[in-house]
Image (cartoon, coloured by chain):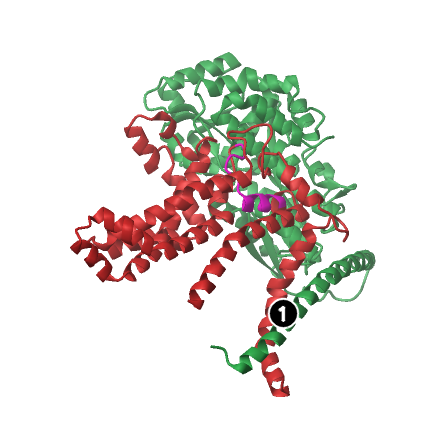
Chain colours: A green, B red
Amino acid sequence: MMSAKQNRLIIPALALSIIALLVSLYAVVAVQSLAASINELQSSLNELKNTVSSLQQQLAKLPTQLPTPPAPKVKLVVIGPWSGDEAKYFQAVIDAYVKTHPNVDIEYRTMRAEDVAAVMPVQFAAGVAPGDVIFGWAWFIAKMGKEGHLVDLTGVVNEKEYVPGIVDTVKADGKIWGAPFTMWLKPGFWYRKSFFQKYGLAEPKSYSEFVQLLEKIKGIQGVKNPLATGDGVGWPISDIVEHFIIAYGGPQMQLNLISGKTRFNDPSVRKVFTDYIVPLLQKGYFSEPTEWTTVIPKWWAGEYGLYFMGTWITGMVQDPSDLDFFPLPESKGVVGGADYAFIPKYSRNVDAAIDFIKFLATEGQGVHASVPSGKIPTWTKVPVSQLWGPMQSVYSKITQRGMAILPDLDDSVGGDWQKLFWDQLKLLWVNPGALDSVLKTLEASQPKP
Amino acid sequence: MRKQDFKDLLMFLGAPLLTLAIFVVYPIVATIVISFTKGGLSFTLENYREVLLETIPLKALVVANPEPYPPWGALVHNAVWILIAVPAVVFLGMLLAYALRKTLGSSFILGIIFLGMVLPGVVSGLIIRFMFDADIGIFPRIFALFSIPILSRTWTIYPQSALFALILGSVWLWLGFSVTLYSAGLDSIPPSLIEAALVDGASEREIFIKIIVPQLKPVTIVVALMTIMWILKIFDIVYVVTGGGPGGSSTVLALIMYTYFASALEYNKAAAVAVMLAVLTLIPAYWYIKMILGSEKQ
């Protein structure tokens, strides 16, 4: 039973609760209007900051007699998508930088691009950043740059020194918001040389030879499917589809699908699916989508003959010297994509971050490409001889065929369309009869030019 | 009220109320306000209209178009989930708790069953993925023994079976909670009731149906209500196992909210889904609280 005193306390307690609720409501409204004012103030401050920093740069160029004071100790937080061995290869780049910049202490943290895109917009809106140099998707960088959350890197990245078109995806409002790092390629179907030798197989020179090869592999005892299908959030399937689009729709179709000029329900796009992809699915050449990393040992053990994957696979197999690949014979291009780094405007060490990102975008690429990262540089000044051995042969095979390097379709479009693309292709893979529904769904949400 | 009383009141209630106001009330009010605005501060129902009529498979709440397999949205998936999982959790939990009472090593078995409850959602999700994998999963392998090809493949990658794999997985996860509550409920049934029934010549089946089940009614209500609330806000295992696919065939409300928030960056629509989710969860929560208060009065 409640005492009389407790009873007396109930009404004031309820009153206090209602007051708290009303105050909260008022606070929501007040905070929202305050946020708008703060944003305006922030942009004015940033303009002022830019003016001060350009003045500082001009002053620095003036000759001076004063001795340079020792550089103060700076700590940079770098956020990237790599973990495990991949993080080890990126660490080599950090080590190379720190060696020449002893005053900089770099802490590396792992965060997937999906999480960067999910978490950071809210943090940026609050005026904070969890890192000084962050890797993310190109579309995300362009979007955040456009919204005024990133440091302008136009003066840092010299577009002419990079693989053509690679900087375009991080441009918005005529400014460059991201610095390109090394590049992966998705060059075609990987196979074990020893597997091909053992069963007398050869790289195909036409599409009919490709189908014949699949039929031969299907007949080999112990092979589940000729082609392994990697699965994850969905990107491995989209990579396969893009390769077919480039090979049988042409590189321009890939570019037009990105820009939205060509729609997914266009007869020419449908033809790529009906004439090439769907028949292969219906004949059971592709395996069920299986988590892409768990496929690697199975494929290596001979459960599958071919595996479509990016160049990073060279660093994930037991013996890279036993590894080779071929693109679809008619292909005139391969998808290549860079990892891009950006600096949030809210970084506490913008100057140090700019210096590090400049290194990442230039000499740092040479370091990353020289270790088994499975990447090639986007900075054209890195000599091919500096690349890791297995990647040198991949690179020369692509250049010998004169293949164009094209942007990744879903990475370029991004947003929730990317997820829809992955999901619909997963559906197609297990239900090829759903082609019309898949193309219609993709077209309905495809961004317009 | 005396001055001293008011001081006591402020001292004891001030700090917790302030904390609640900042960390609970403010976010709730802000979410509600955001869900009814678009851009500015003017009131609109547009967000609710748009999320309810959305037909893109990974965002559809009611009906997806063009049709994936089956053509339902997240609200329907949540409803199907409740219709299947709640009876399964209640029935299996009660049966297991009753059977385990007379089994040697029941504590050990109970511990194993409860494991699903204590595992982090992501880990549980991965286990569910393995459970329904064609190569190593127990369910496909059992059906392979009976030569049923449609169920001997990886359940989670087919639109016809993805949602059911998740539902069965969630039953396994939630069974630990159900069995634990029913075990406690069984302990509270007076043994004299069962002894009297035995003396009167009642069979085990009759004792279970006519004594145990009615006596466990309050526990059943708690298990059912808590399971409904859990299913309504389920997210982690769906995110890990299927991501709502393929073709949007396994989306749920919380995942749609996350998609609006994290992929589409449409915060107003995400808030609208969040409010709808909260309102739906409040219905079983209301009955649950009502029941608790009722039993306290008694």
The answer to whether residue A70 is left or right of residue A62 is left
**Position above or below: A240 against A129:** above
Residue B42 in view, yes or no: yes
Q: Name the residue under label 1.
A: A17
Residue A131, percent across and down?
62, 56
The answer to whether residue B3 is left or right of residue B224 is right
Question: Which segment did they paint magenta?
Answer: B247-260
Residue B241 in view, yes or no: no
The answer to whether residue B15 is left or right of residue B153 is right
Q: In which quarter of the image is the N terminus of chain B?
A: bottom right
Quarter of the image where one finds residue B180: bottom left
Residue B24, percent across and down?
60, 63
**Position above or below: B143 against A152:** above
> Closest to the observer: A433 or A211?
A433
Quarter of the image where one finds residue B59: top right
Asked whether B257 falls inside the magenta stretch, the response is: yes
Residue B247, percent across and down?
54, 32
Write the residue at 62% across / 63% down.
B25
Tell me the amino acid under the disc marked 1: Ser
Q: Which chain carries label 1?
A: A
Write the residue at 54% across / 79% down.
A6
